[in-house]
Image (tube, grey):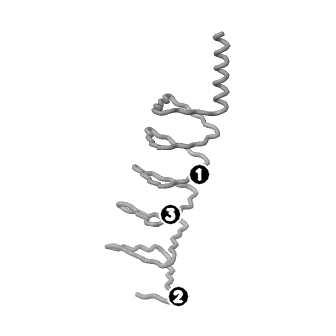
Amino acid sequence: MDISANGQQQNIVGDVKVKVKGAREQSVTSGILISSEKDIKIKSATKVFIDSPVLERSDVDINSFATNSSSIYYIQFSATSLAMAGKIISYAYTSVDVAHKSMAFGRSLVNAQRVEGARVESGSLKRQVLHFFAFFKLRINQ
């Protein structure tokens, strides 16, 4: 079937079910819009693969449930206003980690660290506290 000029428009009232035994392929030279006032579900027995140079999402809520999940990024930027995480076991390897925290609070039952090179810490409040204790220790020993 060839349709030209103004294209084709179909207005259907009621449900539509299409069963295809075999593959289905559609090529479109303009954009595609799929919209619904209700949920849109894409279901596959194996996987859903989206092949695109750019994938954009505009979400209000994101809910994901997965048994296994993996991600590989070359460069990733993110901004989060509030985040919570609960993990039973977590392992991370980072070559270089640079962070700026205005405040950090935490609680650990065990905090074990192994520093094989040099450990350098700085901060004006930490230096003042160390100087205070060093001065106080000198006064006690005299």
Could you tell which of marks 3 and 2 lies nearer the N-terminus?
Answer: 2
The nearer-to-camera label among 1 and 2 is 1
What amino acid is at disc 1?
Ala
Q: Position of residue 17 (x, y in %)?
A: 41, 73
Q: Secondary structure at mark 2?
A: loop
Q: Identify the residue at horizontal 50%, vertical 33% (top origin).
A: 118
**Which residue is outermost to the bottom?**
5
Counting other residues with Cα less than 10 Å from the Cα at mark 3, is it few (<14), some (14-19), or many (20 or more)?
Answer: few
What amino acid is at disc 3?
Leu
Marks 3 and 2, how far apart at CA: 31 Å
Q: Identify the residue at horizontal 60%, vertical 46% (top origin).
A: 82
Q: Position of residue 89 (x, y in %)?
A: 43, 38
Q: Nearer the viewer, residue 108 or 97?
A: 97
> According to the image, label 1 marks what residue?
79
Q: Secondary structure at mark 1?
A: loop
**Which residue is outermost to the top?**
142
Could you tell which of marks 3 and 1 lies nearer the N-terminus?
Answer: 3
Quarter-wise, where is residue 20 in the image? bottom left
Quadrant position of the N terminus in the picture:
bottom left
- Kindly check if marks 3 and 2 are in contact, taking CB atoms under 8 A apart as contact: no
Q: Is residue 41 left or right of residue 102?
A: left
Residue 55 is labelled as 3
Q: Position of residue 49 (x, y in %)?
A: 41, 63
